[in-house]
Amino acid sequence: MLSGLIDFFHTTGFTLITWKMVIMWGVVAVLLWLAVAKGFEPLLLVPIAFGALIANLPTRGVITAQMRPDGVYESATFKIYGQILPNAPAADGLAADPTRQVLKVERVEGGLFDFISQGIKLELFPPLIFLGVGALTDFGPLIALPRTILLGAAAQFGLFVTFMGAGFMGFTSKQAASIGIIGGADGPTAIFLTNHLAPELLGAVAVAAYSYMSLVPLIQPPIMRLLTTAKERRIRMKSLRHVSKLEKLIFALLVLVICVLLVPDAAALIAMLMLGNFLRECAVTERLVKASQNEIINILTIFLGTSVGVTMAAESFLAPATLKIIVLGVVAFGCSTAAGVLAAKLMNKLSPNTPINPLIGSAGVSAVPMAARVSHVEGQKYDKNNYLLMPAMGPNVAGVIGTAVAAGYFLSTLGR
Amino acid sequence: MFLMRLSRWIVPNVSKNHGRCAAVAGGVLLLAAPARLNALPAYPEFGESLVFQFNGLVVVFLALGLIWGLMEALGFVFRRIAARDAARALLAPPPVVATPATPPDPAPVPTIDPVILAVVAAAVHRTVGAPHRIVGVTALTDAVDWSREGRRDHFQTHRIR
């Protein structure tokens, strides 16, 4: 009887627990605490933390793909059962090709996350999430005050600075680009790029990106205050003009065409973003807009979060590189914030008659709408009747486009 | 001198001592950079990395700058069209109305409830404070202001961490 119990014990997962797994349980606990108790980006951190827990338990049937030494799961590990039908006629009806055989698939075996993770590996989830983001985004403030789009461009400075910093710390150029994109504060774009260039860093980059996005209200204000005077923080901006529906529709098409022509590698992201936005603004596809804004983006967020979490196996996550990524991520974020604020100040120097409040420059990092709210709140600390929320939404949504373009540049130059 | 003024413009809220410390730290970093060059991967090298970053920023600014320019042009056209439509509406002759056989009763002149007038006057007094004169009270017909105010109010109810 005892031997039977011992045999049974060997079939349980207890014998497969490692000390690294236990450490990762602590990491999971911290992520869950941040998400649940502190409310930091819970929609993403909860699925990511759960995925990480799944990855660090001796599961069966959840993910069967083998992990390479660099921490990347092999993708083609499905077991396919079927019959080979020799000398099958060609699909186009021509004579049978003797070199061709047809496999009649009867069953495909794989773990749950072998299938779900294909959404990341095949780069489906980030563009589809961008469909929902587009359907949720109002580009009206940006169209009403188009020059604020340059603040979204300036805020990409942090990406490129961090690229060099990561190079100094020993990362390869592809890894450095994946780390730098954290400064764009755009989770789906960071995942999209990292999966393409440095999939071994996917877990660490995603966790850093989403953690810093949730910490925008803590990271940005000191930098904003450091770089501006009290007088600059009190600058009031004119009310934004009304933007017609036709302008919004033309804007969506214009952004799509320009960005795809310049950086075709960002086409998947930009196309879906602008498709979602066009659906929203054309006002005749209400059901599709609702689906994009709710069901599609919500379901994909669960799948994306857990799939990213599953990549956080102890073997790949508990490495010095993770700590470096966390440090570089905050550098990227800080530099992007500073560049946005300084660009706004420069614009005031060049065009003193129509000043803009430099506080909205920090909203050039994506993190929609958190960064815009931070600009608004900071402005109200110095002038209670100064409403910067809508002007700040301009650079905020411009940051989404800017980060996607920067990702396209990295893909075009490093992804070959 | 120019560099000092530039640094004061970039970071206005820092004392001279802090500024000197930052300058020294920056110098140390610059000096340390060549020592770290060998830590860079074979591709890109330091010079290549600088060019790579510059090119990246150029691409981003080019894309967004193009959008900016086109949106300014488009906005100009749309504002002109709106202004032209408004001017046409003002210049258009009043619609001809057939004279009925018997003149109808004069249409009632829209009046504002005295209570609302009192509330508006009180609100203006509370907000402006200084001596003032209300020259007109008009109901808002454009719903944008109300929705914007509602949005502002809604955002203010959120607790910012």
Image (cartoon, coloured by chain):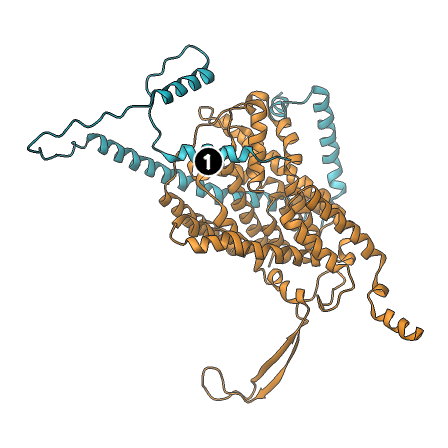
Chain colours: A orange, B cyan
Instruction: From the viewer's perspective, tell me whether residue A229 is left or right of residue A397.
Output: right
Q: Position of residue B41 (x, y in %)?
A: 71, 51
On-image quarter of the C terminus of chain A: bottom right
Disc 1 chain ID:
A
Q: Is residue B122 left or right of residue A153?
A: left
Residue occupying the point 70% across, 59% down: A310
Residue named by callout 1? A147
Q: Does residue A300 lie above or below A164 as drawn?
A: below
Q: Position of residue B59 (x, y in %)?
A: 52, 46
Residue at figure coordinates x 73%, y 67% from the top left: A66
Q: Picture quarter containing residue B158?
A: top right
B108, A284: nearer the viewer: B108
Numbered-mark total: 1
Q: Which residue is nearer to you in this view: B150 or A336?
A: B150
Does A225 appear above or below A48? Answer: above
Looking at the image, which residue is at 76% across and 37% down? B32
Q: Amino acid at mark 1?
A: Arg
Question: From the viewer's perspective, is residue A92 above or below residue A409?
Answer: below
Q: Image quadrant for the N terminus of chain A? A: bottom right
- Residue A381 as seen in the image, left or right of residue A322: left
Looking at this view, is A333 or B9 the one in front? A333
SS state under label 1: helix
User: Callout 1: few (<14), some (14-19), or many (20+) C-alpha neighbours within 10 Å?
Assistant: many
Q: Residue at left 42%, top 51%?
A: A278
Question: Is A36 left or right of B85, judged from the image as shown?
Answer: right
